[in-house]
Image (spheres, grey):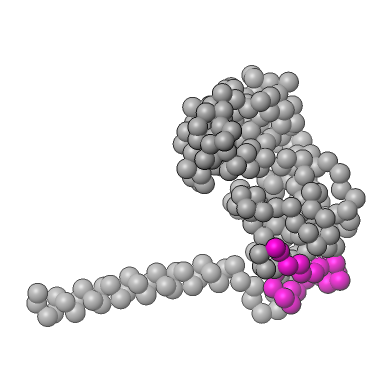
Amino acid sequence: MNKKIKIILISAVVLVIGGSLVWLAAEKKSFIPSSGQPDIKIGASSVFGQYLVDVAGRTLYLSTKDSPDSSMCENECLRMWPVFFAGETAIVADGLSEADFGIMKRPNGSLQTTFKKYPLYYYSNDTKIGDTLGHGVNIVWSVVDPKNDPATLGIIEKPVLERSPSATEPLLEPAKTIYTIIDVAPHGTPRDCWMIIDGKVYDASPTIKKGEYMWGPLIIEGCGKDATALFKRPPMGDGTVSFESSRTWLAASYIGDLR
């Protein structure tokens, strides 16, 4: 190969790799608080009022199954509910008390930030700033009201939302906890996939979109209808290879009951 061509090719490779490294560094930097920036802040919405968010504005959650300085979320659960850790010297925003936040050590030795001794998490299906999709999941996950004591929380229900879509927007159904087969049937595509399993209603759309599980494509045939029989077959049936992960998914994707 001509020496001049070799030099040009090597330069091109260096530029591509260098550009990738710069992009990765920029991506990583966006998740690291700048010096002096609060690691934990207060978000607000018309539905929940004030709730805790991280430095980037991503919603934080707690589980009513947890107890002070102890987490019930392990293994597959952590795929849907990643641990939040703000560092050993977290900075909190005005309006929050540093005394309310602490650090607990998980069984594997990793650290997790706590609020009033309760572990804090993210929800993996939240994809943009302001998303609060984890609230009410499995009636135990909640956004974190900085004025509330986590120990006093009971059943966590999804909020009833009312909205008036514009002429160019598709109609989004109000969130509710009781559905009928007629409610579920229109959600029959991979982009908008609800299904019924053992008398409960689940939204499979995020799982299909993100490709989180190897069995994800298999559930498309259950969109918009009763998929109970589908989940009793391999690889998701009792005693099969994906039984545990599919049941964790069910807990995280539950949106209501069937009337």
Identify the residue shown where x is 46% and y is 69%: 24
From this view, report whether residue 248 is shown above or below residue 15: above
Quadrant position of the C terminus in the picture: top right
The answer to whether residue 241 is seen in the rendering is yes
In-image side of 112 versus 126 (left or right):
right
Q: Position of residue 100 (x, y in %)?
A: 85, 67
Magenta range:
86-107
Identify the residue shown where x is 66% and y is 79%: 35
Q: Position of residue 64 (x, y in %)?
A: 81, 49
Q: Quadrant of residue 120?
A: bottom right
From this view, report whether residue 96 is shown above or below residue 75: below
Quadrant position of the N terminus in the picture: bottom left
Q: Main secondary structure of the magenta part?
A: loop
Q: Position of residue 76 (x, y in %)?
A: 61, 49
Q: Residue furthest left?
A: 2
Front residue of this view, candidates 111 and 224: 111
In-image side of 222 versus 130 (left or right):
left
Q: Quadrant of residue 183?
A: top right
Identify the residue shown where x is 69% and y is 73%: 87
From this view, report whether residue 58 is shown above or below residue 252: below
Identify the residue shown where x is 86% and y is 44%: 154
The answer to whether residue 216 is seen in the rendering is no
Front residue of this view, candidates 126 and 201: 201
